[in-house]
Amino acid sequence: MVDLKKGTHETHRYLHRFFEEPTKPFTPAFPTPPAESSPLFPLWAFYRARFLTWFMIEDSGVSRVPERRKNFLGQSEAYFDLARREYPENPILRIYGGENLPAPGLSAWDERAPAWANHKRRALEQLHRIILWWIDERQLPNGEFGGKWGDDIEMWRWWSSILLGFDDPKVHAGQELLARGNLNRPGMAQGYTSHLTDVEHTAEETADTLTPLMHLEPDEPEWRTRVLKLLSLADSVWWGENARGQLQFKHIDFNASKLGSDPGRTYDTGYHVRVMQPVLLLWQRTNEPALGAQLTRWLKTWAEASAGTENGKPAGVVPPALQWPSGIPGSVERRWVAPHLEGDPMVNLYSWPAYSVAAMTLSLLQAHVQTGDPQFLEPLVKMAALRRTASPESDREDVIGSSDWAAHRVPLVLNDALAKWRQLSGDRQFDDLLRADATGYKRYMLDQDKGQLTEDLGEMARSLSFNWPMFTDEVRYTDRVLSFPHAWPRTVATGLRRIDANLLYSTVTGDPGSVLHYPINGARWHTLPTEIAVLVARNERDEFAAELFHFGSEKRQLAVSFLVLEPGVYRWRLVTSAGERLSHGDVTLSPAHRRLDLTLPSRVLARLELERKP
């Protein structure tokens, strides 16, 4: 606590630091075991198993190495079984044993509400309760949550449906306290971390603090100043002209003042989009030419690399990395599909078709929408065409890097971009691919068919309805708060599914893809995320629609801000599912005024529709 009050040290990790280092070697056992005949041995086994379990869930050096994972898992399960024989009624041990214990305070099913609304309410309220628990029980005065700064600041990603979709002052304040605590650390004094490491870890320090704050407080001058500092650092430290006269990042490793020294890591990658994430968001919100000039020059490098066929890359495919200073996609050793990073266990983050390639594809789409330059849209069109060539017979792992191999994996890097492009443009030429490859909400946006979406929401509500301690007291790593249902094998075996926080974000805001890159969240609901279900059905530039169900016993006053609709005069109406008009009118939307006040009836399915007047 002395360090916390003084603001010293870069991280405190109070949830796991006391056991992490001694546990890492696996042997000798930590804590030191008593004799097996001791009455304390079952209690020791309980603690030992929990340490091993959460370290296995967190550490890729265990979870991604089969032999180590097997060892950790085997001992964890054996020790849990031993402890449960001694303490058979202990609820935590029952959960680790494979039972699913209902969470307290779950919302009741309402027969007047459609199934999707009941599932949605349950999921929203449970997620909200988990967020509030972390704020109330774990957040320290300096803002951190007890993992480490780099993990704590990632939490907003699964908060996004509540943080950005609704308007809870307590959640907003918790996020701002965390962000300010991180940004005001001594190691962030230059506007970017002073810790010299890979881009995946350095970028998050600013991307995961400035991005949510810019969503919440878009007119705050402090955030703009901090964002512009990133562009200044890119100009002075991180990027330069390559051998082709193009703008490119020079290295995977860097901090606020210098680049890494390893000549084997001189690459620009799709993951570098994370460095520019706040700058791209500022450009998206303001469309300022000065921002666009530098960003589009860098993105043109990637658009041109995507168009080519160097190093065996199929034409039109966005590569995962570009060598510096040659600008050649990929590496000699791994061809176009990956950089060659000797001994780096995280190399897959920078390889095709990882998340980072999807991030770059979305950034190219943003550049096209904001500039109208068809060069930035071409990779999306070409990869969609490649996807149509895929057949089951051509999916072979022994031809990595071939057109056939890439065609089968294109959806991983393309689906979000296709869905966002359709909403923004109305272009339906890729609907067949979205129907074939997309799930849940994206399909609903195409056809308004709630079947798969209702099933997806039901699975999420179910996973959040059990094993409350595994989202709260038991968690020791703050980047793994929602991981237990898909990470603990005995719970996986019960049928609980991975929790897809992006699904809730999409259904609440109307953004069919990632919140991280080129977000098109169309609505923010100025009300608490309790006793309510919201499903955005249409989120376009000149039209908006959403279904709403209020579970409370009295009328509900709320407001909604429209963030994608273009300025103009809109005709709006609120109707019941039977077509009865509840309220209507005209509203003029402008950059300074985007809000509409509403009154929802009690326990009646309503639909809000806005359409731009000619």
Image: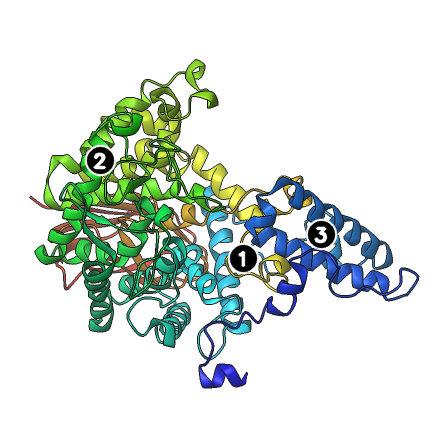
- List the single residue furthest toward the top: 393
Q: Is residue 353 above or below residue 48?
A: above
Q: Quadrant of residue 583?
A: bottom left
Q: Position of residue 503 (x, y in %)?
A: 42, 45
Is 293 left, or right, of 77 in this rendering?
left
Identify the residue at horizontal 14%, vertical 60% (top origin): 591
Where is the N terminus found, in terms of image quarters? Answer: bottom right
Q: Is residue 386 above or below residue 135?
A: above
Instruction: Give, as a three-letter code, the residue at label 1.
Output: Val
2 or 3: tag closer to the N-terminus = 3
Can see residue 128?
Answer: yes
Tell me the SS state at disc 3: helix
- Near mark 2 (Cα within 10 A), the count class, few <14, some 14-19 or many ≥20, is many
- Near mark 1 (Cα within 10 A), the count class, few <14, some 14-19 or many ≥20, is some
Instruction: Give, as a three-letter code, the residue at label 2.
Output: Ala
3 or 1: tag closer to the N-terminus = 3
Q: CA distance from mark 3 to mark 1?
A: 16 Å
Identify the residue at horizontal 55%, vertical 55% (top origin): 107
Q: From the image, tell me which residue sits under label 1.
A: 481
Q: From the image, tell me which residue sits under label 2.
A: 305
Q: From the image, tell me which residue sits under label 3.
A: 96
Tell me the SS state at disc 1: loop
Where is the C terminus found, in terms of image quarters? Answer: top left
Q: Is residue 578 above or below residue 479?
A: above
Can see residue 465?
Answer: no
Instruction: Give, as a three-letter code, the residue at label 3.
Output: Tyr
Q: Position of residue 197 (x, y in %)?
A: 40, 58
**Tags 2 and 3 touching, CB below 8 Å:** no
Closer to viewer: mark 1 or mark 2: 2
Q: CA distance from mark 2 to mark 3?
A: 49 Å
